[in-house]
Amino acid sequence: MIMKSKKAKQLSRRGFLRTSKGIMGALAVPWLVPASVLKGVVPSEQITLGVIGIGSRCRLVLKHFMTNEDLRCLAVCDALEQRRIFAKKMADERYNNNDCAMYKDIPEILARKDIDAILIATGDRMHAIGSIMAAKAGKDIYSEKPMSLTIEEGRALVEVMDRYGTVYQCGHQRRSVDSYKFQVEVVQSGMIGNVHTVQCRTWKSGVIPAQEPQPVPEGLDYDTWLGPTPYHPYIPANVLHAGWNYFWDTGGGVVIGMGCHYTDIAQWGLDRDDTGPIYYKGTAEYAENCMSDTPVTSNVVCTYADGKKIVLESEGSFNDRFIRFIGDEGWIQVDDATNIVTAEPKSILNKRGVSARGYIHTNDHVRNFLDCIRTRQETTCSPEKSHRATTVCHVANIGLRLDRDVQWDPQKEQFVNDVEANRMLSRAMRPPWTL
């Protein structure tokens, strides 16, 4: 835990770091040892972590967090008891003790004054709301993607993080991966000429067959799991193994679940981190006689005001996913499953350093977050950048759901002359949940 100073009643160290955010971005701070070289860190200088949501993705990311010697995981929180037990075991084995606490309810873990940062790896329904609650509780936040379930949630998150001076990192970890960094460098240096299209290929979505409601299993607080989303009888396929991703009430399918990774890289490469496309034209196929209600396959052309395009494609197999920047003098592509970079002209590849680290190596992204907690600098995937990238997918998804082309105003963050679409900027929340 980062301890408070002797003048804690007047200004805590955390409070000092936040109020001096602007100054510290410009001045050297010799009394802060760079986190990248910290070894055998004394307890008073350790960053303390709490974890909310412990599915398969969390377990991978948490391992990366716990490789850092200047961090200690103190507590875990999940609506499902067996997941809480699993995560506690991870932490206790890592630190050779029995100290990791378990919580079922988010307010309980956020009430811990000895926790500096929160890792949020729930389903989409709690990413923004959980982040906002954590910021108001004085925590810094690493949240899995997509950062929000709706566009309204995303904007609210950005505003709260700014108001509270919160260090926030979205789990768009590809921004911290060498292959994508190289791809963006090639694009922005003009090596493939004027880029006119970014092709973002994800995969064909899964289809969940109809199932009958079942009794809520022992050890699951289903009301807590639902959070702000509408009540539905418990059906295992909706809840377990990320099945919630394929239901509109709790997710947005592959278009948002994976698409936001690629729109993040596309916006970065095109230098559009503060804006977005304005015209969206797409088609989608939905499965019949099943429970899931998000697109199985889709194709959306998202066009910026200057004519540049992002093409979001959901089709093919999981291992065929890629992102390709296409210019008038060539192209460059990263295959997401293999981290292999291809390009035309091929001579571009001679400029790349050798690395085998792909998207699954999340530690660089985690390390950036931890370093920014100490320096109070902006993270690689700051709130505004992440919100803009996620919004591209939200707008595309809304157009597909309405089955029509839509026009978007990135400055006002509203659809143009489309009352029905604007109603979908937000969703009603089940009491007592609120932004």
Image: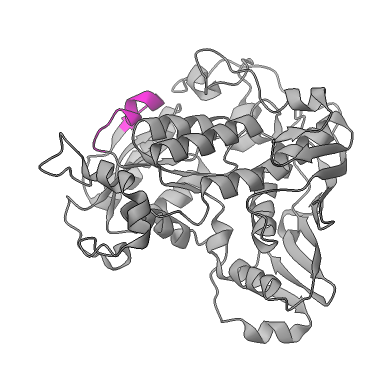
Check if residue 194 falls in the magenta segment.
no
Nearest the camera: 300 or 196? 196
Residue 128, image x, y percentages: 53, 34
Estimate the x, y position of residue 18 in percent, counting from the top left: 33, 45
Residue 110: say if magenta: yes
Left or right of 292? Residue 367 is left
Q: Is residue 229 above or below residue 194?
A: above
Give the left or right position of residue 176, taking residue 288 as reference: left
Q: Is residue 234 above or below residue 332?
A: above
Left or right: 181 as drawn, with respect to 295? left
Q: Is residue 85 above or below residue 44?
A: above
Query: How many marks overall?
Result: 0
**Residue 402 percent location from the top left of the image:** 85, 29
> Is residue 210 in sight in this rendering?
no
Residue 78 is drawn in which quadrant? top left
Q: Residue at x 25, y 33 (%)?
A: 113
Question: Could you tell me which residue is drawn at 61 percent across and 26 percent down?
Answer: 236
Determine the residue positioned at 70% across, 29% down: 247
Residue 75 in view here: yes
Q: Which residues are magenta?
A: 102-114
Residue sticking out furthest to the left: 6
Relative side of 26 to 304, left or right: left
* Quadrant, the N terminus: top left
Residue 156 location (% of width, % of height): 55, 32
The residue positioned 40% from the left and 27% from the top of the image is 106
